Amino acid sequence: MSDVYRKWVDGFKGLKGFRPPAATAIKQVLAYYSQSIKESGQAQLEGWAHALGYRKQPKNGLDRGEQKIERLLLERPPIEIVRESGRPLSLKVTEQNFPLARQNKGQVLCDALGFIKHGGIHHPVVIEVKNTDANPWFAVVENLIQIRLARFNLNNIEQHVIKCSLKDKNLQKARGSWGLVLAPSKYFSKEPIYLEAALKLIQELKSRTQARIILAATDELKEGRLKWIKGSYWPS
């Protein structure tokens, strides 16, 4: 993997630590997101394959924190993302621990990969799962890096998932790539300064780029539901 890619991903990861003012932090994130990474070569090898289903090995055989959420995502398709009013979105999670770069050095993993169906179109969605680690700003920037690489590599992701995980859905084409940050509701409410900055970043991304990020609470995931966090992206 080229030095161009390594410098880009390392610099982007460095922005996960929020430093006020929010306007400056957001400007820096937008600048990194907009940088070209074509010189790095393909972000994902063609023909990539791995064992489907839950892939992590829990300590002492017991899932902890984020692992519990990830297992539920894989075990309960389709999942509804609901809001106060309006129709819910349908989410099908197909992969766990999905790598988005070619080599281990500079590797970017999303905790899960799935598809959201909206308006008859399937959007690949890279999913960042949190329980107590870090804060909403950290999680959103982390998810944005994943989105950037997923959009760069959409054709390969389409082919892998369509052929392997969605072969029974008669799916011919996917559009764009979205992001989804999942955590218990208390994760989003514990430190308002980080949530406020993260929501401002999401709105700027919606205005200036094609990146879309939904924040959703996992409190009702056992019942097959995720609750949209007001202020994050919701497709109309």
Image (cartoon, rainbow, N blue to C red):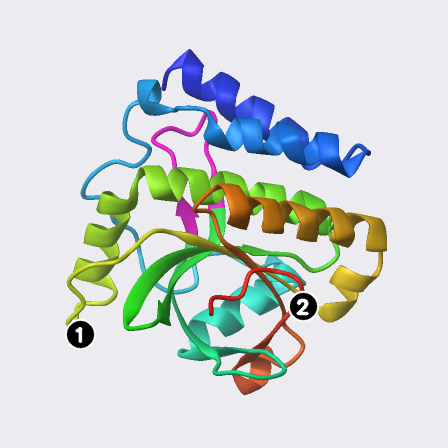
Residue positioned 73% across, 69% down in the render: 185
The Cα–Cα distance between marks 1 and 2, rounded to whole angstroms, is 34 Å
Q: Residue furthest top?
A: 3
The amino acid on which the numbered mark 1 sits, given as a three-letter code, is Asp
Q: Position of residue 188 (x, y in %)?
A: 75, 61
Q: Nearer the viewer, residue 38 or 236?
A: 236
Q: Is residue 50 left or right of residue 162?
A: right
To which quarter of the image does residue 142 belong? top right
Visible residue check, residue 62: no
Tell whether position 103 is magenta: yes
The amino acid on which the numbered mark 2 sits, given as a three-letter code, is Lys
Where disc 1 sits, the SS reads loop
- Residue extent of the magenta highlight: 97-109
Residue positioned 38% across, 24% down in the render: 37
| Image quarter of the N terminus | top left
Q: Nearer the viewer, mark 1 or mark 2?
A: 2
Q: Residues within 10 Å of mark 2 (few under 14, many from 20)?
A: few
Write down the residue under mark 1. 168
- Which of pointers 1 and 2 lies earlier in the amino acid sequence? 1
Q: Nearer the viewer, residue 207 or 121?
A: 207
Write down the residue under mark 2. 230
Q: Position of residue 97 (x, y in %)?
A: 45, 51
Q: Residue furthest bottom?
A: 223
Where disc 2 sits, the SS reads loop
Q: Is residue 225 left or right of residue 114?
A: right
Residue positioned 44% across, 54% down in the render: 178
To which quarter of the image does residue 155 belong? top left
Residue positioned 57% across, 33% down in the render: 30
Visible residue check, residue 16: yes
